[in-house]
Image (cartoon, rainbow, N blue to C red):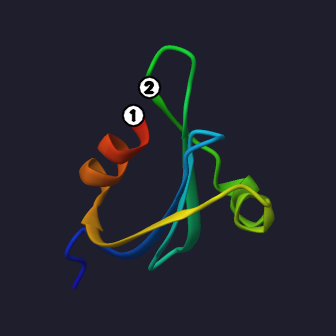
Amino acid sequence: MATGLISNAFVIGTVGAAVYRTEEGLRALSLDEHGGYVDCSRQAGLLLDCPAEKRQLIGVNLKALQQSLSL
């Protein structure tokens, strides 16, 4: 049963993106120029491999993950 809780996510602040795993697989989202969110799951592997500093979040929901991106 899905709880909406993301057990493990990585926020890459310098590129304004986050990568997280769901039941469907690896997902990613990023901020657009208007402050909205864009699904960029096709680039999830590239984002994880990028050398930028990553901040790990544990036990968050999607809304909290989006809020951490906007900071």
Q: Name the residue under label 2.
A: 36
Query: What amino acid is found at the position of numbered circle 1 in the picture?
Result: Ser
Residue 22 percent coordinates (x, y): 45, 74
- Residue 55 x/y as whole percent: 49, 63
Mark drawn on residue 42: none
| Residue at 55% over, 45% down | 13
Gap between marks 2 and 1 measured at Cα: 9 Å
Indicate left or right for 42 with 31 as reference.
Answer: right
Q: In the picture, residue 67 is in which quadrant?
A: top left
Name the quadrant containing residue 3: bottom left
Residue at (51% x, 75% y) in the render: 24
- Of all residues, the one furthest to the top in this rendering is 34
Element type where label 2 sits in the image? loop
Q: Which of marks 2 and 1 is nearer the N terminus?
A: 2
What's the mark number on residue 70?
1
Q: Relative to 6, does residue 52 appear above or below in the rendering?
A: above
Dot 2: few (<14), some (14–19), or many (≥20) neighbours within 10 Å? Answer: few
Does residue 62 appear left or right of residue 17 in this picture? Answer: left
Camera-side residue: 31 or 51? Answer: 51
For marks 2 and 1, give the one nearer the viewer: 1
